[in-house]
Amino acid sequence: LEKVFIFLGDKKEIDIESIESLSAKFKEYTIFDLQDALAAKNKQSSFKIAFNLLEKGNEPVFIIHMLTRFFTGILRINELKAANTPDAQAARIVGTHPFYVKKFYNARSLYSDKELINISRALLNADISVKTTSAENKNIITILLAEILDAGEKKSTA
């Protein structure tokens, strides 16, 4: 309540708009929220969540690492499905909880092989940039997300 009263200032009435505005400012997202947004190819949410993660002190190296694990899991999910691997075992292999393995299957249906190859390249480039350049963290993550979300538009050289 203290945050609400500070936010309201001289205003004496708490309305729904004030609460919504305040909650949006203090919302903290997790890397899993970003993965969910990317799995659904939701551009607006992906950028909003990624910027929130950076503002809350998450390092780009961590974000890139977790997205690499996520997209590597998506790449592997079809072979696990083809081998009739039980969900619990597939979840262990791709590094997630059995409850979330269905999100990997859903994401795989949205991303083509070509897109996943381009995403892998984008993740590698972002990792190299963050470790070898003085580029701004927000710029590196912005470029990475743009390349992930537009991966199907690029021509593969592989």
Image (cartoon, grey):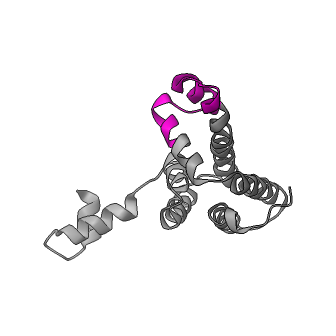
| Residue 101 inside the magenta-drawn segment | yes
Residue 17 appears at what percent x and percent y?
23, 71
Residue 76 appears at what percent x and percent y?
68, 37
**Which residue is more in the foreground, 124 or 107?**
107
Image point 50% across, 50% down: which residue? 36
Report the predominant secondary structure element of the magenta stretch: helix
The image shows residue 45, relative to residue 120, as above or below, that is below
Question: Which segment did they paint magenta?
Answer: 80-103
| Left or right of 33 on screen, residue 18 | left
Extreme residue in the bottom direction = 10
Residue 41 appears at what percent x and percent y?
54, 59
**Which residue is more in the foreground, 11 or 49?**
49
| Left or right of 15 on screen, residue 103 | right
Image point 20% across, 77% down: which residue? 10
| Left or right of 23 on screen, residue 61 | right
Q: Please tell me in which quadrant of the rendered image residue 136 appears.
A: bottom right
